[in-house]
């Protein structure tokens, strides 16, 4: 399956060898165990903390993504020198979106979720794929935040990210309902693919 490099994404991007390279100028990913101690490279972590330094107004510091990741031990075979990780056992789903040319593009939850989370005034978000080329965006603004402004910024960031993946045909729908907890596990999943594989 084709994994296109998202040209517009500032934080992380997929490489031809299937690793997610983290732009260390702008973001720090720290794989940690259940007590938030660093997990050595080559070992699956309990979760991972994201610090996003790109937004100076509202930097994201050690945000718990809830993903188990594996940091690459040696340099990546693709030649990229940036730190590389792979999402090991995730609770979030990989989205498979249909491009205008008929190909299916895989989108990692870690990447697409962090794009939306850069929105100022946003407390929590949830992305639900409801069709081959449709994403329903659930937003929970911070108390006192302008919900319309949060929607405009979050949806614009999402559309820009999708455009970088050659997914300009994908529609983003504003959900009336807020993000929902998973009924079965009780765990919060930021990215949900409802379509069968
Ligand atoms: Zn690589």
Image (cartoon, helix red, strand yellow):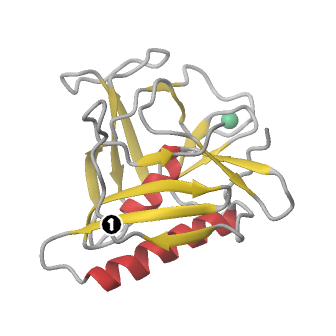
User: Which quadrant is home to the C terminus?
Assistant: top right
Task: Provide residue 73's location: percent of width, then percent of height.
Answer: 55, 19
Q: Is residue 55 above or below residue 88?
A: below
Q: Is residue 104 above or below residue 99?
A: above
Q: Residue at x 45, y 38 (%)?
A: 92
Horizontally, residue 142 falls left or right of residue 50, namely: left
Residue under label 1, please give it.
139
Task: Provide residue 1's location: percent of width, then percent of height.
Answer: 79, 38
Classify mark 1: helix, strand or loop: strand
| Image mark count | 1
Horizontally, residue 114 falls left or right of residue 8, namely: left
Q: Residue at x 42, y 51 (%)?
A: 27
Task: Provide residue 9's location: percent of width, then percent of height.
Answer: 58, 60
Q: Residue at x 73, y 36 (%)?
A: 79
* Front in this rendered view, residue 177 or 148: 177
Task: Provide residue 134's location: percent of width, then percent of height.
Answer: 60, 63
User: In the image, is the residue at mark 1 within 8 Å of ligand 1 by its beta carbon?
Assistant: no
Q: Is residue 26 visible?
A: no
Q: Quadrant of residue 141?
A: bottom left
Q: Is residue 104 visible?
A: yes
């Amino acid at each position: 399956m084709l994994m296109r490099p998202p040209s517009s994404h500032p934080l992380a991007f997929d490489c031809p060898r299937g690793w997610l390279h983290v732009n260390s100028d702008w973001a720090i990913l720290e794989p940690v165990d259940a007590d938030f101690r660093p997990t050595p490279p080559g070992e699956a972590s309990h979760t991972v903390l994201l610090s996003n330094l790109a937004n100076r107004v509202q930097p994201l510091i050690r945000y718990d993504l809830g993903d188990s990741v594996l940091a690459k031990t040696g340099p990546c075979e693709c030649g990229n020198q940036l730190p590389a990780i792979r999402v090991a056992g995730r609770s979030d789903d990989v989205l498979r979106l249909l491009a205008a040319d008929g190909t299916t593009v895989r989108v990692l939850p870690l990447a697409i979720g962090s794009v939306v989370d850069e929105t100022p005034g946003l407390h929590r978000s949830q992305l639900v794929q409801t069709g081959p080329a449709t994403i329903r965006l659930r937003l929970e603004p911070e108390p006192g935040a302008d919900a319309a402004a949060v929607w405009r910024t979050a949806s614009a960031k999402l559309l820009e990210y999708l455009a970088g993946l050659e997914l300009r045909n994908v529609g983003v729908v504003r959900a009336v309902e807020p993000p929902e907890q998973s009924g079965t596990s009780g765990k919060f999943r930021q990215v949900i693919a409802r379509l069968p594989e």
